[in-house]
Amino acid sequence: MTLAHLLVTGGAGFIGSNFVHHVVAHTDHTVTVLDKMTYAGNQASLADLPENRVDLVVGDIADAELVDGLFAKADAVVHYAAESHNDNSLHDPRPFLDTNIIGTYTLLEAARRHDTRLHHISTDEVYGDLELDDPARFTEDTPYNPSSPYSSTKAGSDLLVRAWVRSFGVRATISNCSNNYGPYQHVEKFIPRQITNVIRGIRPKLYGTGENVRDWIHADDHSSAVLTILDKGRMGETYLIGADGEKDNKTVVELILELMGEPRDAYDHVTDRAGHDLRYAIDSTKLRTELGWTPSYRDFEAGLAATIDWYRENESWWAPAKDGVEAFYASKGQ
Ligand code: NAD
Ligand code: TDX
């Protein structure tokens, strides 16, 4: 790849920081992270990276002047920054509009001014949900049908990118990935919440019946897919990223308990999420056949066991957020 300097928005968050680690390990690129350091950003996620490869600029992607200066120096931009949690979007949608819609608009205008290559990170949730017994999976041609304030703002941001490509010739690609797991994920999310609950002696909390299905991919596989698209992706195209990892939530909770040496039924059913999507499933044939990408983490149980080890060994990383997150969920009966 001829790219040398990447601007990574949201690089202090879960998937963004995994991507920065992946770039440092597998390429010669240098990286500037632009991150607002919201509750979801954590400088410790970037702490062990070489200073001559990675620097952090604390700021808002909706700050046009700041963004303009950073685009002037970047060979390509990878856009992870977002408000990312469905439950928060049900409680207070406004930050989702500010960051996911206005923030993405601000980046697109800068990409247009500087003719900078932009890769936009999105989610399979833009497609809505599938029935449990539906043999279909999402493809690049599935119509958009988002359910939550979060997924509707991600859908809106995708449509802005498509419009800026068509109307202004912006050089952009989009990827829509399934649920990620791995190190550096905030304890508000499903898998880290349950692992850290078990570490703390709290029973895991399953929303509703727990029959909801998510299609799990390791964050490092998401990173390798994004690098592949940056390298070989066709401008204006959308690529779905997934690793054939469908599991229902009940199975995941039981596996976490078993791997952590607890009885498989030592969890509670709690109030369901409003509008809870039933099932996500990704068909990533286009990415695999056109660009030659394949996932490396094929054994979910082994990846989950390594993730459990990471949370056990890095309590100082997650402990400061844990009590506040649990108090928030408790206030909602979750
Ligand atoms: P995260 O919440 O862990 O991280 C988001 C990061 O963005 C944080 O560091 C935060 O400080 C930063 N940020 C938020 N608002 C900002 C702003 N206005 N300006 C600059 N920085 C800002 O999220 P994540 O789970 O790492 O998700 C990253 C991206 O991947 C998002 O775009 C999300 O929609 C997408 N995605 C996530 C998943 C998943 O399973 N987590 C799956 C598919 C796609
Ligand atoms: O305590 C919990 N108990 C529970 O049963 C939590 C926090 C979640 N759940 C359920 C809800 C979902 O069915 O687990 C599943 C996963 O929940 P989240 O981790 O909140 O993820 P999800 O809502 O599926 O969205 C994630 O994947 C797609 C990311 O947070 C999004 O940013 C991404 O777009």
Image (cartoon, rainbow, N blue to C red):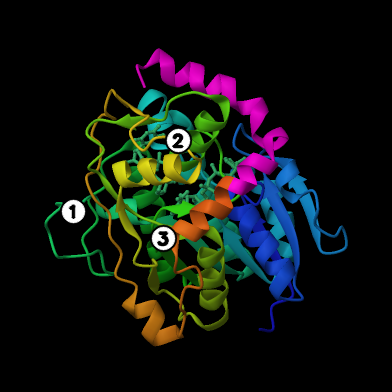
Q: Which residue is mark 2?
A: 262
Which of discs 2 and 3 lies nearer the camera? The answer is: 2
Q: Is residue 40 left or right of residue 145?
A: right
Helix, strand or loop at label 1? It is loop
Task: Give the alpha-carbon distance from disc 2 to disc 3, as whole Å.
Answer: 31 Å
- Camera-side residue of 55 and 67: 55
* Mark carried by residue 11: none
Q: Is mark 3 within 8 Å of ligand 1?
A: yes
Q: Is residue 327 magenta?
A: yes
**Residue at horizontal 14%, vertical 65%?**
135
Q: Which residue is mark 3?
A: 177
Q: Is mark 1 within 8 Å of ligand 2?
A: no
Q: Quadrant of residue 227?
A: bottom right
Say which amino acid is labelled 2. Glu
How far across and how far down the image is residue 148, in percent? 30, 38
How far across and how far down the image is residue 244, in percent? 34, 67
How far across and how far down the image is residue 144, in percent? 24, 56
Q: Is residue 179 magenta?
A: no
State how many labels appear.
3
Q: Is residue 182 visible?
A: no
Helix, strand or loop at label 2? It is loop
**Would you say the magenta stretch is mainly helix, strand or loop?**
helix
Dot 2 alpha-carbon crowd within 10 angstroms: few under 14, some 14 to 19, many 20 or more: some
First-in-chain label (3 vs 1) = 1
Q: Which range is magenta?
A: 309-334
Q: Is residue 213 left or right of residue 312?
A: left
